[in-house]
Image (tube, grey):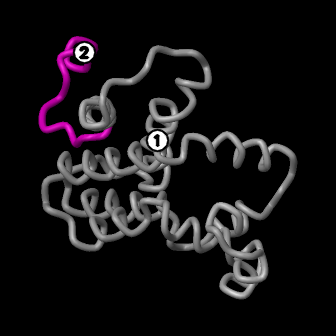
Amino acid sequence: IAEAAGVGSATVYRHFGDKRSLTEAYLAASTPRQVVWSIAREPSMDLRADLEHIVRTILERMEAQRDILPLALIERLRGSTLLGDVMHGPHRTIHGVAALLRGYIERGELEAQDPELLARALQGMIVTFGFLGTMLGLPPAPPHEATARLIVGIFLDGARRKTEPSSAVQRSQP
């Protein structure tokens, strides 16, 4: 890091103190937390637009970090707790998504479900399209904007509050 920045290692330690503080600073600068929490605190009242903005932002950050994500995963699998310790806490991106979803649930726009589980489901789609698909040799995802629309569309079709019973439910009733 010091070499890439063109400074001595003592300068890096003086500025960040230790590896944990360096990791925290990196995550604060490179994760979508600020964008997600900004939307969660002041939603546009357009659920689809809010989610597409969040998903697009996350996909963009994942692409920018595509070389670091596999390393972080390997470190995690090796038992390193540094990233896990730093990333946990009440201000994680997934908690911001859950807070946004909770607001839309309270407004009656989403089914009354656990917003943390909904956020996890959305996160799973984002990680698959933004990271795992490439690792598994799947064809590249469409551009971020189109991928965000696709992910949000799939997510909302399953999570959006139904205004009328579906025809499948009507057929199964006597």
For residue 168, the mark is: 2
As drawn, 78 above or below 2? above
Q: Nearer the viewer, mark 1 or mark 2?
A: 1
Q: Secondary structure at mark 2?
A: helix
Mark 1, residue position:
63
Q: Residue furthest bottom?
A: 14
Of the image marks 1 and 2, the number of the one nearer the N terminus: 1
Residue drawn at point x = 70 percent, y = 78 percent:
12
**Which percent across, then down, holds residue 169?**
25, 20
Residue drawn at point x = 52 percent, y = 70 percent:
28
- Front residue of this view, candidates 14 and 72: 14
- Front residue of this view, candidates 88 and 174: 88
**Which percent across, then down, holds residue 45?**
13, 60
The CA span between labels 1 and 2 is 40 Å
Task: Magenta stretch: give its range.
Answer: 159-174
**Which percent across, then down, holds residue 118?**
43, 47
Q: Residue furthest right?
A: 78
- Front residue of this view, candidates 79 and 173: 79
- Displayed quadrant of residue 125: top left
Residue drawn at point x = 47 percent, y = 47 percent:
64
**Considering the image in quadrants, where does the N terminus appear?**
bottom right
* Badge 1 amino acid: Glu
Residue drawn at point x = 22 percent, y = 42 percent:
161
Residue 113 on the magenta segment: no
* Badge 2 amino acid: Ala
- Neighbours of disc 2 within 10 Å: few (<14), some (14-19), many (20+): few
**Which percent across, then down, holds residue 39?**
27, 65
- Displayed quadrant of residue 66: top right
**Left or right relative to 164: residue 28:** right
As drawn, 83 above or below 14? above
As drawn, 131 above or below 48? above
